[in-house]
Image (spheres, rainbow, N blue to C red):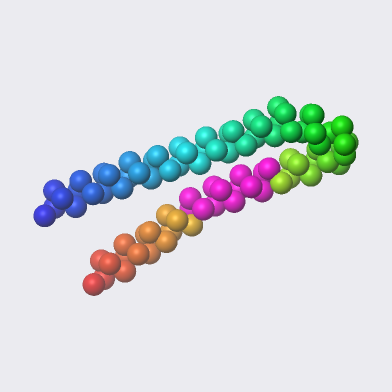
């Protein structure tokens, strides 16, 4: 019984690490795309410095929201685990 629970815990932990890695790679690709192509060739020539600042702010907000989902998901899982232990 305990070995089966332990195995599921390790599989769940590995799945979490994979999700975290995917999110960090996604953020990195987003910023790479924005700062190496989109901003210099699309935004800056059309909108100048104000467009550049707006793009940076939006990119940072998107990144924070992606990272916030990690913490919200962890808190929700911890709350569910606490509820399950009470039963």
Estimate the x, y position of residue 71 in percent, counting from the top left. 48, 53
The residue furthest left is 1
Q: Quadrant of residue 18?
A: top left
Which residue is at a point 38% across and 45% down the rendered structure image?
A: 16
Is residue 63 within the magenta segment? yes
- Residue 75 percent coordinates (x, y): 43, 59
Q: Is residue 47 above or below residue 87?
A: above
Residue 27 is situated, as x and y percent measured from the top left of the image, at: 58, 38
| Above or below: residue 82 compared with residue 11 | below
- Asked whether, in this view, residue 9 is left or right of residue 66, the answer is left
Please indicate whether residue 4 sits to the left or right of residue 82 in the image. left
Seen at 15% across and 50% down, the residue is 4
Above or below for 6 versus 30: below
* Residue range of the region highlighted in magenta in the rendering: 59-71
Q: Magenta-highlighted stretch: main secondary structure?
A: helix
- Residue shown at the point (35%, 64%) measured from the top left: 80
Q: Is 43 on the left or on the right of 75, as rendered?
A: right
Q: Residue at x 20, y 48 (%)?
A: 6
- Quarter of the figure with the N terminus: bottom left
Query: How many numbered callouts?
Result: 0
The C terminus: image quadrant: bottom left
| Residue 3: % across, % down | 13, 48
Name, please, the residue furthest toward the top.
36
Q: Residue 67 lies in magenta, yes or no? A: yes
Q: Residue 81 appears in which quarter of the rendering?
A: bottom left
Of 24 and 87, nearer the camera is: 24
Q: Is residue 16 left or right of residue 8?
A: right
């Amino acid at each position: 019984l305990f070995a089966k629970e332990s195995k599921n815990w390790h599989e769940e932990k590995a799945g979490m690490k994979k999700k975290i890695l995917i999110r960090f790679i996604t953020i990195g690709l987003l910023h790479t795309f924005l700062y190496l192509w989109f901003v210099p060739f699309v935004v800056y020539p059309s909108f100048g410095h104000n467009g550049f600042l707006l793009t940076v702010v939006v990119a940072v907000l998107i990144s924070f929201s992606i990272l916030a989902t990690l913490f919200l998901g962890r808190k929700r899982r911890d709350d569910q685990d606490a509820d399950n232990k009470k039963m």
